[in-house]
Amino acid sequence: MGTWPLWIAFNAGVVLLLFSDLFWFHRRAEAISLREAAFESVVWIALSLSFGAWIYISHGRGPGLEFFTGYVVEKSLSADNVFVFLLVFQYFRVQPKFQHRLLYWGVLGAIVLRGAMIGAGDELITRFAWTPYPLGIFLLYSGSRLFGADHAVRPERNPLLRWAKKILPMSDAEPTGALFVREGGRWLFTSLFLVLIVLETTDLVLAVDSIAAVFGVTRDPFLVYTSNICAILGLRALYFVLAGLLPYFQYLDEGLAITVMFIGAKMLAAPWVHISTGLSLAIVGGIIAASVLISILMTKLRKGPVRAKIVTRTRTVTVEVTPELIGSLADSDAAERAWAASGLFHAGLGRALDSLEKWEQNEELAELLVREKAEGQDRGESRVRFTTGVAVLPETFQRIRSANGSPPLADAPADQDVLEFELESSQSGLAHIHLDILTTNAPGGSGAIARFLQKFGEGIQQVEIDVTDVDRATQILRTKFNLEPVYPSTRGGADGTRVNFFLIPAANNTKLLVEFVEQPKGLHQSPVTLR
């Protein structure tokens, strides 16, 4: 149905909406509130549905239903991609106030790249009648891989990013939201431009199965393109809405897998079995709605407190712990401090991931784990309390403490070589982020922290897991997991706690020190919250 006037009018409208969004509604780089993001999502969805209604009225029932089916498929797959974008921002420590601007340019680039992919797909289908069959096989394969999908982000494996780092002239200045800056009479690329490269290439990879799926719904390139673009136009606002709600959608991957495989099977069976567009829309919408509904019901209907795992599937990201990252805990910008805390917390979590998942599967040990309610979650939901311990030099310790309002020091036993205080950051719908900032009482001495700093420098010295009975937890780890504690018996810890330590296997054939801390109710002091 696409004529040149329609193509020109649609793209002109998209450009007008994007430029209005950038230069009118979001002129300044700032974080987007949940309420604002929800309102913008409603507006974008309403515009898309209005466009679909216009197609339905002006061009008939068939094209209208094909548009809506393609839109539902692409919108659903885009929702799952939101977490990938979240991990990209975590990996590069992009401040929340810059994320909306980066997603804006990412969407603009995605429109161009997806348009080219759709044009190439249409040309293949037009020239070669057998093209739908390999596309159907690809969708069956792609759908099967969505079951238990690994959403981990590994930008270091991105060849385009490696090339850009070597070739492009880069600025060392702190990010201000710009992709380019002028320094010393020449233009330089900023670190945010590298993030944009990863966003664009990641979206390109993720778009392959979604575009193929929409071609399984309709062969009209205009409907494929418009349904695709309408779905991703609201992706920026949807990101800020769903980022904190993704733990609820634990079965979305399975729903998407079934949807993609259904469309692949439909393409392969087309010569023998005809499935109408209306029925396809009902099946696709039903599958997605059922996956979300089951996710919510499984969360709501569990008896007693929800025992949410420390990490959902493999949805974590490897964060490089650098002096710059640790130093950002002393930054004057509270948002930068919170982002650094998030990076360090997840770095510790990533190192302990394999062992944590095994321990969570042991019912007896799981009962001993102390849990806390996530921000914005229902009363019955709780998450394991996990803390990353970061060892720093005394001067760094003082800078971080001063930048965060000089929180009180923990009351550590006099015979232990440690000064420490705790920082906390929270985000709606996600687990609390806890950090212990540690330093030595005697630099160059023989204490545990001093020896760590001498050997490794500043970094993650340990992780901490709170339990209700440290003696019982020690016994389970010894008998069920063949792990021997560092100390033969429980010893005193900070603030009157009882603790024991274990060395567990970590990545790259290293060991990680895990401190099990007994936390009776009312004993733990309130940490300082990063805002």
Image (cartoon, rainbow, N blue to C red):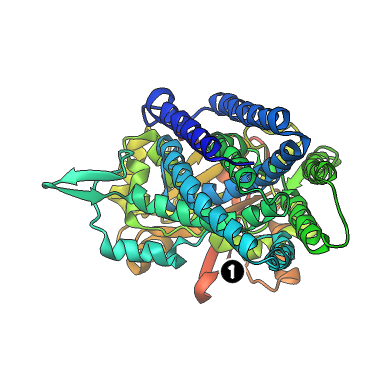
Q: Is residue 9 visible?
A: yes
In the image, residue 420 lies at what x, y percent?
Answer: 43, 47
Between 304 and 33, the one lying in front of the other is 33
Q: Quadrant of residue 16?
A: top left
- Total numbered labels: 1
- Tell me the residue at 69%/65% (across/down): 129
Does residue 97 appear left or right of residue 301 in this picture?
A: left
Vertical comparison of 5 with 158: above or below: above
Does residue 250 appear left or right of residue 3 in this picture?
A: right
* Residue matched to label 1: 504
Between 175 and 282, the one lying in front of the other is 282
In the image, residue 456 lies at what x, y percent?
Answer: 37, 67
Does residue 338 appear left or right of residue 286 in this picture?
A: left
- Tell me the residue at 36%/47% (across/down): 192
**Secondary structure of residue under mark 1:** strand
Q: Is residue 410 visible?
A: no
- Tell me the residue at 45%/35% (across/down): 530
In the image, residue 3 lies at what x, y percent?
Answer: 57, 40
The residue furthest bottom is: 509
- Tell me the residue at 80%/44% (across/down): 277
Q: Quadrant of residue 19?
A: top left
Vertical comparison of 399 with 367: above or below: above
In the image, residue 88 lies at what x, y percent?
Answer: 48, 52
Between 186 and 440, the one lying in front of the other is 186
Tag 1: residue type? Ile
